[in-house]
Image (spheres, rainbow, N blue to C red):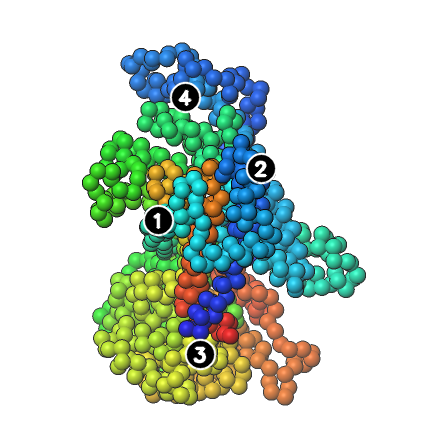
Amino acid sequence: MLTYIGYRLLAITPVLLGLSLLVFLVMALIPGDPATAILGNFATPENVARLNQQLGLDKSLAEQYFIWLSHLVQGDWGRSYSLNRLVLDEVLERFHATLILAGAAWLLCSVFGLLAGVIAAVRQYSWIDKIVTFVVLVGISMPAFWLGLLLIMLFAVEWQWLPASGMYAIYGGGDIRDLLTHLVLPALTLSIVAMGVVARLTRSAMLEVLRLDYIRTARAKGLKEHRVVFRHALKAALVNIIPVMAIQAGFVLGGAVYIETVFQWPGIGRMLVNAIASRDILLVQGGVLMVATAYVLFNLCADIAQHALDPRLRLRNRI
Amino acid sequence: MQSYAVWRKGLHKPNQPAVRPSGWQLFIHNRLAYVGMWVFVGCTIVACLSPILPMPDPNETALAQRLVKPWFTQWLASGVEQDHGGDSGWLGTDHLGRDMLSRLLWGTQVSLLVGISATLVAALVGSLLGLVAGFWGGRTDNLLMRGIDMLMAFPYILLALAIVAVLGAGLMNALLAIAIVNIPFFARNVRGVTLGIARQPFVEAAHLVGKNRLQILLTDVLPNVLPTIVITMTTTLGWMILETAGLSFLGLGAQPPQADLGAMLGEGRKLLFTAPHVSVIPGLMIFILVMSINLVGDGIRDVLDPRLKSGVMGRPAAATDVQCEKIKSEMITAEVDGLQVNQLQTEFRIGATTYQAINDVSLTLAAGECMGLVGESGCGKSVLALSIARLVPSPPGCIVHGEVRQARDDLLRIPLSQLQNIRGNKVAYVFQDPATALHPLFTIGDQLVEAVRSHHPVSYQQAWQQAINWLERVQIPNPQQRAHSYPYQLSGGMRQRVVIAMALINQPQVLIADEPTTALDVTVQAQILRLLKKLQQDTGAALLFITHDFGVVASLCERVAVMYAGQIVEMGYTSDVLNHPAHPYTHQLIRCVPKLGNPLTEEGKLATIEGLPPATNALPTGCFFKPRCPWADASCSKSSIALTPIASQHWVRCGKPL
């Protein structure tokens, strides 16, 4: 097991390198001259040339990449010109907020998605199965940002139960309860689609497993039904569900872009949208790199979890 | 849904009109998909007609008529006089006084166009990559797939954002971004299917015929990959519309004054508190559009790839449904020593058709006795075995008559919790295929422990010790280490020993072995049979041994019952039945067993029984074996024939026994 984790850690290094190269290339390909963008349209050509030299933009692309990468590794992610702040500081701060939101949403989608899927599978064709199937269909067909607006109208404006926006109350607040009340609506909105996907997959995976011979064996052994369903069937189904749950983690990280905009959550998604609008390349670069790295690490965790669950994979992946 | 199952069933069963429903018939049979299709077609037609409908220009501003509410809210609040008044559109106007209905329809047109184009681009490029990677394989495959993996290392919305960041905001750029992000999905799906098809014999045959690779790709591979491409397209179309709307919502897609659903939502968001209709209506339109597309997509997927449609057949319940009145029994309180099955009747109900799998079966199994149950495939042996502890999958299975007595209980009428106490404890099973009977993700020790602990309040360590003792009793070498093994680490014979240990570990009174050696190779079969017999004698359990092998029955069982079409047709001591078969079916069946050294009949053939067993949804009146019986005459079809004794302890279900 430990060797496997070590092997996987080694194996993601090229992925991360490729990721950085991709991000670098994408940003280097942006049409327009960063120096002009910084200095404005009325800058003199001398000033532009000087700034280009200062920024190292007169060097070759490969050189630029290695310089950029070495800076990146040393924690120098550059300075955002639109915010006049170190990119790393800004990205870390914003990522912290996104992680809270996306983490909560992922937890919600996993727990309720699994539960709904299991119940729907065990009670196939019952009214509860039909309701779950229908709600899932509605959930994955709805624009999440629109759902967010509806929820704000209902819970924040009409009933005034929950705050409509932000992460903390402006006056007072700042404690965990304040955070949670602000978290409920955005996390719920963000999780709906992912929840639908997880529920749908869990249902079909469970139905597939529940028909297998070893489930009959478990019943023939005299096990109680909850043990058959949750220990025997769900464990086998999870092997197929875990990769999808990892994809959903990517989905909530990305979907946070909309939800943060709707709920004015001070996360990295909103930062990215603003940075794109103001063409703050270094900030976009930093934000994209941060989220993508987190996603790669998350997929790694999912791989390890799947590996721990299914002994047959251990045989296949032996190195 | 159920009649869908009937349809599929109808393809295989005799006595049913075997018409294969066309894809279109299957599709419109799915009511939701049908409704979705009409909604989608309706939306598309109206959106396409928007240029010629009598509506105001979507971009025509009228600041005097700003934020007029839709007619239904006006109607709801009919008492309140509108400030702006005027008759301006059913859906009101937005913050610039533009007609909402007009913008909505134009916006729908844009969303559909963008979504469909993005899907086509992604499908074309992605499928091409997938086809090439899957068909050429080797280094090409490796290189392409690494690139795809790299793209998939990004959360896809983020990737779309990054692409828009490069290209700049705009509808075309958003379209491109969404298309690029979706290329990996197509590439991966198509590659997977192509890989499978490229190894099929018909592709190899095409190679041998001398077609070149491109020809094979176009004429042999592509047609088989097409369903996958269509399925992926229909399932991603809705998602692409959502995503482009999302980018426009963020202000990165369609730019004002372009009427686009997402952009309308984004603009309306700022007016959420004062004029909610400006954002709610376009959102609702997106929702309806995407929902209808998803419904159609699900419908198409079910038609093109029935394997993906989960749960066509039956829901697996904890115990088989029992739908019958208590039958009268004189020995209602008498304790049964072993097992007693009375007039059992089990059916499978699929749609409107009823298949009678078990038809009035009664048998008694004394303690310590070994009884064989013989019959050809599909005669109901396994269903009978499973019915005893109500393990027949339900629905479609249903026990409609009879009782199963064990000790003082009727297993068909006790509550589930009580039944669970008996399963594995008093009545245990050994199934046919040990490769699938054990849970692949638990160690065998763990599975044995679970069997013990679900019936006895012992500690894990004690149960573990017991498990190891039993592994030793079933002659597994190194039980201490082996207990930590997973099933995939054992051979088939070893696995079956584990299954036997698991069945006997609680010292059950009744052991039901359903063809326990069929899946094993011949040398192992004999060992397992000897082991089973020895352990049965040691524990004193009654054994119901299901097989189609008369040789095994002769060496193992004191008594034997012969089944045909869900009925017991002959029952008695093994020597009586084998030496003096009274039922024509038994006679024919024994004749079919090849004799050592002289396996052929006088005509120089292996003996067979002509014809097939009757379909259990259309059983003939009278004797079920009549159509295949060489001795049958008119008297055989008069009325149903009862199982009658012809000698001491020898019953037969035949009007004129041999």
Q: Nearer the viewer, residue A269 or A284?
A: A284
Check disc 4 and report the residue beneath it: B95
Check disc 2 and report the residue beneath it: A45
Q: Position of residue B505 (x, y in %)?
A: 32, 80
Q: Which structural element holds mark 3?
A: helix
Residue shown at the point (24%, 68%) measured from the top left? B332
Q: Position of residue A105 (x, y in %)?
A: 35, 49
Q: Nearer the viewer, residue B150 or B405?
A: B150
- Identified by mark 4, the residue type is His
Q: Chain of mark 4?
A: B
Check disc 1 and report the residue beneath it: A93
Q: Is residue A181 left or right of residue B530?
A: left
- Identified by mark 3, the residue type is Arg
Check disc 3 and report the residue beneath it: B495
Residue shown at the point (35%, 24%) measured from the top left? B275
- Identified by mark 2, the residue type is Pro
Q: Nearer the viewer, residue B319 or B599?
A: B319
1 and 4 marks in contact (CB < 8 Å): no
Q: Position of residue A75 (x, y in %)?
A: 42, 56
